[in-house]
């Protein structure tokens, strides 16, 4: 184990929220009404997958700026019998897409995805073939127990009757008002009278309620070959988009095996490429395993320095290695090999920051959502889903209430690269729905939104739990860092003295009010107690279920 002189611990931070506990189920989402929807399904006899799908549909109503049935994502499922499955319902490039479809404006770091008129970000040309509805229905059909119509009822009620909006939704509307105003349907819904919908307003989505009812009646085929798909394709044809009915009819969910690694006696499971998380979280843990991170103290200059160097190594390799495995050969075995980690670790200088290039040969949006659900039988799902940017492409399919994604922004608009556009190619992602075991038993499951910052933040939570022995609530709320090789971002709770020492070692320091989004997580105690936690960075809410039915044989007497 590499030696390093311990530095003082940072001052303890204060958690903003409290965890929930239960014995018969736990639902944690980034909106209280979605957590309520999932818990309603658990109480009705559904399993964790039923509840997660119900919560995701509810989030399309109450968190419309983050997630929708025209989006995409990754779900990591562990069934009670120990089976792990990753459902990849990420969006794909339309058949008419080409590597040269956008007019690129720059190739500078941080500006590689800038194109003329923001066509890959706003409007119909930014929309990739949606996979969310297909993926959620696939998860339900393979691993759930309840019919789709029943699972959709909470979301239908929220859309039809309305719900009271939060300040978080109001702020997202205000931040995106100029782009929302370009679409008549979205302007009417979120900018009544030309002003952002105030917090505390009741938002009713009648058109979307009818869309959800149609899905409940006829299933996902209404989009992938039915009237909703026709409405989407017709809108694209009229407005310069590329998606047609053939794209929708040919879309397929991919079922994948998770990446597995080990860290200090724990088994680490995460999604494989085109997700970065499984490969690079395991890679970074392999690097950090050579240090006594716990002894350094959470938030110390030494601990943060090592985290930052591990992140830079992972991002250097990710830039040349991680993409859709159907189009790019990803050297998974090499990346997660502990011997490769040792090679990279040997190059780390404990007293100085350095620049890293890949040891191999050969821009996403922050606006996503995450759901973590466990039931009393031992089934667990960790699912990250998105329409990519805030309100996606800021367009709505008239008469349906469906918001479009802007997933085309995730491709590199320059031709000839690993992440360049190709027809049918899946977008790559940093989504990190992680599940960790200890001695063969569930230990914790977690995930979060936050684009490129997702899997580095998931890594930090895992280190917080294993090395720093934090509680679950502390682990999800702890101050975070992030770097991709340029500046080192630090959240406010990391003391100035630590920032000054890191700057002395050569890290360009930038303070950030928030790194990545609202993490939520569940931990599993050996006695069957489930603990759920959500952090201050979103409207996250854990709902725990305990109690149960009357004891067998109990009779009332009069």
Image (spheres, rainbow, N blue to C red):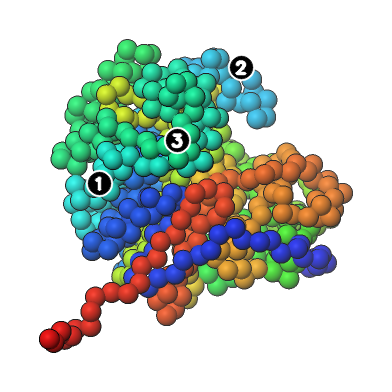
What mark, if any, has residue 152 been given in the picture?
A: 1
What mark, if any, has residue 183 been given in the picture?
A: none
Counting other residues with Cα less than 10 Å from the Cα at mark 2, is it few (<14), some (14-19), or many (20 or more)? some
Position above or below: 121 against 279: above
- Between the C-alphas of marks 1 and 2, the distance is 43 Å
Counting other residues with Cα less than 10 Å from the Cα at mark 3, is it few (<14), some (14-19), or many (20 or more)? many
- Which of 27/222 is in front? 27
User: Of label 1 and label 3, which has the lower sequence position?
Assistant: 3
**Label 2 close to label 3 by CB (< 8 Å):** no
Q: Which residue is mark 2?
A: 105
- Between the C-alphas of marks 1 and 3, the distance is 19 Å
- Closer to us: mark 1 or mark 2? 1
In this view, which residue lies farthest toward the front? 558
Describe the element under mark 3 as helix, strand or loop. Answer: loop
Q: Which residue is mark 3?
A: 65
The residue positioned 32% from the left and 74% from the top of the image is 547
Residue 326 located left or right of residue 447? left
Q: In x, y percent, where is residue 214?
A: 19, 36
User: Of label 1 and label 2, which has the lower sequence position?
Assistant: 2
Residue 273 located left or right of residue 5? left
The residue positioned 49% from the left and 49% from the top of the image is 539
Position above or below: 343 against 226: below
Q: Quadrant of residue 488?
A: top right
Asked whether residue 242 is in view, the answer is no
Q: In x, y percent, where is residue 528?
A: 40, 76
Describe the element under mark 2 as helix, strand or loop. Answer: loop
Figure quadrant of the C terminus: bottom left
User: Of label 2 and label 3, which has the lower sequence position?
Assistant: 3
So how many labels did they put on this image?
3
- Which of 384/518 is in front? 518
């Amino acid at each position: 184990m590499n030696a390093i002189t311990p530095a003082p611990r940072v001052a303890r931070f204060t958690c903003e929220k409290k965890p929930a506990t239960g014995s018969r189920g736990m639902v944690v989402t980034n909106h209280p009404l979605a957590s309520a929807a999932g818990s309603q399904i658990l109480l009705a006899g559904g399993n964790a997958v039923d509840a997660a799908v119900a919560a995701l549909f509810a989030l399309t109503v109450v968190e419309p700026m983050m997630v929708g049935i025209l989006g995409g994502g990754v779900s990591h499922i562990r069934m009670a019998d120990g089976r792990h499955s990753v459902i990849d319902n990420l969006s794909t490039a339309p058949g008419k897409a080409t590597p040269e479809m956008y007019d690129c404006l720059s190739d500078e770091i941080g500006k590689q995805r800038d194109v003329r008129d923001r066509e890959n970000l706003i409007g119909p040309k930014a929309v990739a073939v949606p996979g969310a509805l297909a993926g959620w229905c696939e998860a339900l059909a393979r691993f759930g127990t309840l019919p789709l119509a029943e699972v959709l009822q909470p979301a239908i009620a929220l859309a039809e009757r309305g719900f009271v909006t939060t300040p978080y939704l109001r702020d997202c509307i205000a931040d995106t008002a100029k782009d929302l105003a370009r679409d008549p349907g979205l302007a009417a819904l979120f900018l009544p009278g030309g002003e952002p919908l105030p917090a505390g307003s009741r938002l009713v989505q009648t058109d979307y309620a009818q869309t959800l009812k149609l899905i409940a009646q006829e299933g996902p085929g209404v989009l992938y070959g039915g009237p909703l798909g026709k409405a989407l394709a017709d809108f694209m044809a009229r407005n310069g988009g590329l998606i047609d009915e053939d794209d929708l009819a040919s879309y397929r969910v991919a079922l994948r095996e998770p990446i597995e690694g080990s860290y200090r006696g724990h088994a680490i499971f995460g999604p494989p490429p085109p997700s970065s998380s499984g490969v690079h979280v395991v890679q970074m843990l392999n690097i950090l395993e050579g240090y006594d991170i716990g002894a350094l103290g959470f938030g110390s200059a030494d601990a943060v320095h090592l985290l930052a160097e591990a992140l830079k190594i992972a991002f250097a390799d990710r830039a040349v290695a991680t993409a859709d495995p159907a189009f790019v050969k990803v050297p998974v075995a090499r990346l997660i090999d502990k011997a490769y980690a040792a090679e990279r670790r040997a190059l780390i200088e404990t007293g100085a920051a350095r620049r890293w290039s890949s040891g191999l040969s050969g821009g996403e949006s922050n606006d996503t959502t995450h759901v973590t659900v466990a039931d009393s039988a031992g089934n667990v799902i960790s699912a990250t889903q998105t329409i990519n940017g805030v309100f996606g492409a800021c367009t709505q399919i008239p008469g349906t209430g469906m918001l479009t994604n802007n997933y085309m922004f995730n491709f590199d608009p320059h031709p000839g690269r690993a992440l360049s556009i190709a027809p049918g190619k899946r977008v790559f992602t940093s989504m990190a729905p992680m599940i960790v075991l200890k001695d063969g038993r569930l230990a914790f499951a977690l995930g979060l939104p936050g684009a490129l910052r997702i899997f580095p933040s998931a890594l930090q939570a895992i280190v917080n739990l294993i090395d720093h022995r934090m509680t679950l609530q502390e682990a999800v709320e702890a101050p975070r860092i992030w770097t991709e090789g340029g500046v080192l971002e630090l959240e406010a709770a990391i003391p100035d003295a630590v920032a000054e020492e890191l700057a002395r070692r050569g890290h360009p320091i930038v303070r950030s009010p928030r790194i990545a989004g609202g993490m939520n997580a569940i931990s599993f105690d050996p006695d069957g107690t489930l603990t759920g936690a959500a952090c201050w960075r979103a409207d996250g809410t854990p709902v725990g279920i305990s109690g149960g039915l009357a004891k067998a044989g109990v009779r009332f007497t009069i």
